Image: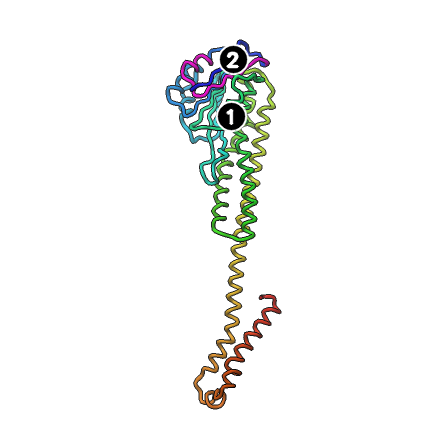
Amino acid sequence: MSDTAPASGSRDRHRLRARCLHNPDGADISRHIREDGFAWIDLEGPKEAELQEVARHMKLHPLTIDDAKTFGQRPKIEDYEDYVYLVVFGVDPDTKSGDRLLREVHMIIHGQAVVTIHPSRNESLDELRSECHDRQIRSEQFLVYKILDAVVSTFVPVLERVDDQIDALEDAVIQRISSDQLQAIFSLKRDLVSMRRVVTPMRDMFQRRGDDIAALPGLDTDDKLYFRDLYDSLIRISELVDSYRDLLSGASDLYLSQVANNQGEINKQLTIIATIFLPLTFLTGFFGQNFSLLTTDFIDSAWSFWVLGIGLLVASVAMMAIWFRRKGWW
């Protein structure tokens, strides 16, 4: 199913319309690339024939087609004679913590069109395509910027969710620890490590090579601040990722500290119990000796049982309790 828009007869920036095509057939690709104007071709899980059709009309290098079919790459930008090939990453805001979070998008930026390639549905690109379809745009560079910004901006809601989860984890750890909290901490750490693995290279890539996109032949010269804004956004995202990793390390330390405190409290309680039973063990052991002096002269009546047997035990427990209370241990 392809989305088409009327052709524009001029490339004047004030009348330039964005033609946004989603999985177009070969005829649509040929028609819109050859027409005067600028097209966005969005390929979701493309087949070999679709990629070859794009390559034929845009005169792509064979290495570009090989890269376009290979997912699981790292962020990169490659210059060719009249186009630029990019691999950028976003995230899926609806993915649960610990699941596959990253969403890889390949881009071919040409003077006649921009091609985006991704293996599965990308909601951020779907929304932008609906928003820009058959609408006037400032320039080709502006449309390229909007596509890149739509991909990069997906990190923001995920990081906001991570921030809320860290706050909730810290509160829960203080109130009562459980093994589920430690599992949640490790899941969030994996998410942040995955994001940091792609955000940092993208940040460096746009810092060094952002102007290469603006200098492509066939693109109207426009404000370079677009790509500087992308760089600024990636700096903020990178700083947030690093700060949340530090917060998670603090949450891990807090969890381990709470575990140690709980173990110390348990050891304290066991020590108190053992200390209380120390005089009880001595008294019962002493009066349990089978000597005639004890059995005939001391333990020979009911009062001796209640005073020496029970009374001393109760008195020793009371004295130990008073001592613990004064020491602040109980």
Please state which of the two labelled residues, at mark 1 or mark 2, is closer to the viewer.
1
Give coordinates of residue 47: x percent, y percent. 38, 22
Q: Which mark is residue 193?
A: none
Judged from this view, the residue extending furthest toward the right is 326
**Residue type at the position of mark 1:** Glu
* 242 vs 38: above or below: below
Give coordinates of residue 151: x percent, y percent. 51, 28
The residue under the point 53% across, 9% down is: 9
297 displayed left or right of 323: left
Q: Are marks 1 and 2 in contact (CB under 8 Å)?
A: no
The secondary element bearing badge 2 is classed as loop
The secondary element bearing badge 1 is classed as helix
**Residue type at the position of mark 2:** Gly
Q: How many marks?
A: 2
Query: Mark 2 — residue?
Result: 37
* 281 vs 53: above or below: below
Q: Residues within 10 Å of mark 1 (few under 14, many from 20)?
A: few
Q: Which mark is residue 127?
A: 1
Q: State which quarter of the image contains the N terminus.
A: top left
1 or 2: tag closer to the N-terminus: 2
* Residue 178 magenta-highlighted: no
Please report the bounds of the magenta region as a residue range: 14-32
Q: Residues within 10 Å of mark 2 (few under 14, many from 20)?
A: many
Q: Is residue 252 visible?
A: yes
Q: Is residue 67 visible?
A: no
Distance between the Cα atoms at labels 1 and 2? 22 Å
Q: What colouring does the structure picture have? A: rainbow
